[in-house]
């Protein structure tokens, strides 16, 4: 995975998070893992702001 600096970034996921990422990759096959994680983090932040 590549970070914003262009340097590789390695992320260790828990078993459940890894399964979730695999499921999202299969649904959004046109997106990279980085794009999926970016979108998920932004969505999580936005949904939290709405509920607080």
Image (cartoon, rainbow, N blue to C red):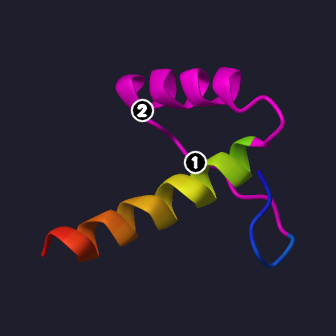
Q: Which mark is residue 17?
A: 2
Classify mark 2: residues with Cα within 10 Å, few (<14), some (14-19) or many (20+). Answer: few
Q: SS class of the residue under badge 1?
A: loop
Q: Which residue is mark 1?
A: 11
Magenta stretch holds residue 12: yes
- Which residues are drawn in magenta? 7-32
Which label sits in the foreground, 2 or 1?
A: 2
Quarter of the picture containing the C terminus is: bottom left
Magenta stretch holds residue 43: no
Residue pictured at 38% horizontal, 60% vertical: 44
> For residue 9, which quarter of the picture?
bottom right
Q: SS class of the residue under badge 2?
A: helix
**Marked residue nearer the N-terminal end (2 or 1):** 1
Residue pictured at 45% horizontal, 60% vertical: 43
Numbered disc total:
2
Q: Residue furthest front?
A: 50
Q: Looking at the image, is 40 positioned above or below residue 25?
A: below
Q: Are marks 2 and 1 in contact (CB under 8 Å)?
A: no
Q: Residue furthest left?
A: 52
Distance between the Cα atoms at labels 2 and 1? 11 Å
């Amino acid at each position: 995975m590549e970070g914003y600096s262009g340097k590789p970034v390695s992320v260790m996921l828990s078993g459940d998070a890894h399964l979730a990422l695999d499921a999202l990759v299969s649904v959004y096959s046109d997106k990279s893992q980085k794009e999926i994680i970016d979108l998920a983090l932004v969505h999580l932040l936005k949904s939290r702001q709405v509920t607080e």
